[in-house]
Amino acid sequence: LQRSIHGLFVVGSVRCVYVTAVIFAGANAVAVRFTVEELDPFWGAAIRFAAATAIFAFIVLIRRLPLPRGRTLAGLLIYGILNFGLSFGLIYFAISEVTAGFTMVILALTPLLTFIFAVLHRLEPFRWRALLGALLALAGISVAFAGQSGGGAPLWAVLFMVGGAACFAEATVVIKKLPPVSPITANAVGMGVATLLLLTLSLVAAESWVLPAQPATWTAVLYLILFGSVALFYLVVYIVQHWTATASAYLIVLAPFITVPLAAWLLDEEITAGLLLGAVLVVAAVFVGALSGGIGQPEGKKAPAAEST
């Protein structure tokens, strides 16, 4: 009975965390739109992750969390390069050439790519249900944003976006394969190495290293640091450690349905009928691929106690 009650508590808490992470991730897209209006892409991303790294590192120090070593450290460095450095580097650089709608269509590939990578890494068995859910999610996003797709987007920008989705997917698999580690430590290391990579890319691109001048940009940057980076990616690592890699990846599929209403309010963007139909397909996809058949249930390997406090 005690195990059953504990299991129900974990399932409920992880799903609450999941919903919160979706909200933060959805608002991120709007905040990034504000920042790229004033800041160069690599530099804007570097500011965000540098500040978030400092916050995570400070928490590691005051809580005296153990520092990763050996295989865990190497894995976290790879996770940071993929999940924060390469992915955001590719997406930030290409986002000016690809519309927000078409970006979401491409990033909807993430659950499918995560499933494929998880199978290739022998992290998860092949499940027709997970594959069906991922394909249904892609169809839902495609329908939802069909009227907003960037038909004239250059091929290189589209490939960059696909590369960003692939980096997100592989990073999810990498963090899932690592021994249990605090999300605080994981993100301190991951965002730290990503900041160095993004600053290098910024130097190569000869970007201007200036601080924001507009109040709206400052507000967006502060949101991205505190909620879009520190809070969001703490929750993401927590979710990945308690759910399967494939189920965790559905975050990026649901996020646009927070982005679009928020963008309609703040940026006067239109909410189309296609979005409503796509929302139905995506909700069905999440149920099929992540919540039914035990795919999204908590797993036996749990995070250490330090992670849940």
Image (cartoon, helix red, strand yellow):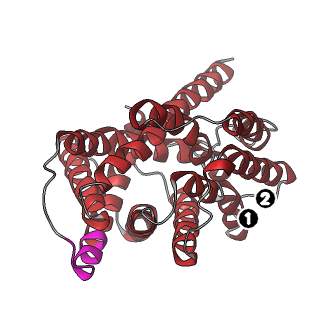
In the displayed structure, does residue 112 sit left or right of residue 106? right
Q: Which mark is residue 190?
A: none
Is residue 219 shown above or below 246? Answer: above
In the displayed structure, does residue 48 sit left or right of residue 270? left
Residue 72, position in %: x, y? 42, 64
Residue 36, position in %: x, y? 31, 56
| Location of mark 2 (residue) | 125
Residue sitting nearer the eye, 68 or 219: 219
Residue sitting nearer the eye, 67 or 264: 264
* Residue shown at the point (41%, 38%) measured from the top left: 267
Give the residue type at disc 2: Pro
Read off the magenta span: 197-207
Q: Are marks 2 and 1 in contact (CB under 8 Å)?
A: yes
Residue sitting nearer the eye, 16 or 143: 143
Residue 32, position in %: x, y? 36, 50
Residue 288, position in %: x, y? 80, 40
Is residue 70 shown above or below 49? Answer: below
Magenta region includes residue 229: no
| Location of mark 1 (residue) | 119
